[in-house]
Image (cartoon, rainbow, N blue to C red):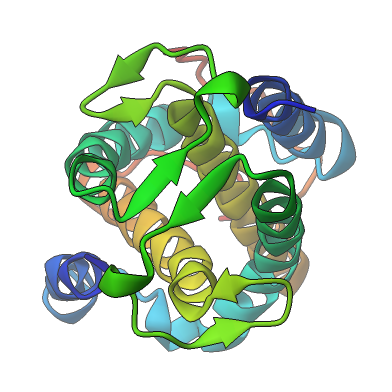
Amino acid sequence: MSYTVLAVVGVAAALVLDLLVLRTRVVTLRAFWTAYAIVVFFQLVTNGWLTGREIVTYDESQILGLRVAFAPVEDLLFGFSLVVQTVAWWVWWGRSGGSGDPSGAARPDQRG
Amino acid sequence: MLAFCLLGTLPLELWLGVRVYRQWRRLLLTLLPVVAVFVVWDLYAIAAGHWDFDPAQLLGVVLPGGVPVEELLFFVVVPTCALLAFEAVRRVKGWPAGDE
């Protein structure tokens, strides 16, 4: 599978984990999207450094070729998947550690 | 780059009181599945040649499967910093996250 395909699968898997498996629904949280906006800014800076200096290089045949700040656009999907999975597990462990109601009343929706 | 991320987010823990490092057990349990998934992805990507690293710009410590130690550190540092950002936003804005 190409990096492009894997990156899309990675995002889908993260969403399944968050919405269906752990049911943490972090992608419906304003706190998540605000934090993600901060994270993605720093991702562009640090990833730009890593790819601009060619510390990391990519096989051009495995990516679309569209680049943002030197890095393949696929890296943004990779990073998004990483952040979603991380925050979902974090919230999940925070729940199971406490005695709070995990059924979760509707959260204010805020999509990016 | 990794040091920049850690140092840049350290004030969030120290002065904003976001309590990510202080919940080290929860942090560890969060990192375990995430690191596992992304190391597998990395192993596949390296084997398939999706990405490659410049040996001259690495520490030189390579884990089994050709994974530079920086990659493993990346999968620990980046999620940790993301959690620091998430907890900082919650703390400042008072928004719910579902684990209250």
Tell me if residue A70 can be seen.
Answer: yes
Q: Position of residue A18 (x, y in %)?
A: 73, 37
Q: Position of residue B73 (x, y in %)?
A: 46, 75
Residue depicted at 65% across the width and 54% down the height:
B46
Residue depicted at 72% across the width and 81% down the height:
B64
Q: On the rendered structure, is A12 left or right of B9?
A: right
Say above or below: A80 vs A95. above
Q: Considering the image in quadrants, where does the C terminus of chain A appear?
A: top left
Q: Nearer the viewer, residue A45 or A35?
A: A45
Tell me if residue A107 can be seen.
Answer: no
Q: Considering the image in quadrants, where does the N terminus of chain A appear?
A: top right
Residue depicted at 31% across the width and 44% down the height:
B94
Q: Position of residue A67 (x, y in %)?
A: 33, 18
Q: Nearer the viewer, residue A15 or B74?
A: B74
Q: On the rendered structure, is B72 left or right of B64?
A: left
Where is residue B7, by image quadrant? bottom left
Q: Nearer the viewer, residue A2 or A88?
A: A2
Where is residue B56, by image quadrant? bottom left
Say above or below: A56 vs B84. above
Where is residue A96, by image quadrant? bottom right
